[in-house]
Amino acid sequence: MKHDDLSRQDQNALDAAAFRRLLAHLDDRKDVQNIDLMILADFCRNCLSKWYRAAAEERGLNISDAEARERIYGMAYEDWKANFQTPATPEQMAAFEARKRD
């Protein structure tokens, strides 16, 4: 079956399932830091939370930054940072800065 043959409802269901799988994968890989994601893929968990909030706003839903981050991180952002975020290394910062220049 081609993607174009799917109903809008099926497309939305598949998109939602893939998004939930991405969140579960990121939750399983708390060792992967946001800066690593930014260096490699030019997005991170914070980007996802901003996209989530923007999608809510497009639909007339009021979701705060904190609520969007909690959805993406699976916990309060401050808790995630305290428990899982490590300081960026000089090598990570150099790679991040180089990526921004590209």
Image (spheres, rainbow, N blue to C red):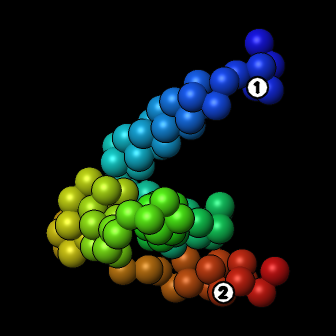
- Depth check: 34 or 86 in front? 34
Query: Where does the C terminus fall, quadrant-wise?
Result: bottom right
Amino acid type of the residue tagged 2 in the rendering: Glu
Q: Which residue appears at 62% of the width and 80% of the height?
A: 96
From what the image shows, is residue 69 above or below residue 10? below
**Residue 11 occupies quadrant:** top right
The first of marks 1 and 2 along the sequence is: 1
In the rendering, at what x and y percent does residue 58 appear?
A: 53, 65
Q: CA distance from mark 1 to mark 2?
A: 38 Å
Tell whether 50 sits left or right of 97. left
Q: Is residue 85 visible?
A: no
**Rendered location of residue 52, percent (x, y):** 46, 61
- Residue type pointed to by label 1: His
- Which of the numbered marks, if any, corresponds to residue 97? 2
User: Residue 35: horizontal and vertical position, in percent?
Assistant: 51, 72
- Residue hosting label 1: 3
Horizontal side, residue 4 vs residue 70: left or right: right
Q: Position of residue 39 (x, y in %)?
A: 63, 70
The secondary structure type at the circle numbered 2 is helix
Where's the N terminus, which quadrant? top right
Residue located farthest toward the top when viewing the structure as drawn: 1
Q: What is the secondary structure assignment of the residue under circle 1?
A: helix
Which residue is depicted at the point 72% across and 78% down?
99
Q: Residue at x 36, y 57 (%)?
A: 72
| Residue 5 shows up from this direction | yes
Q: Which mark is residue 100?
A: none
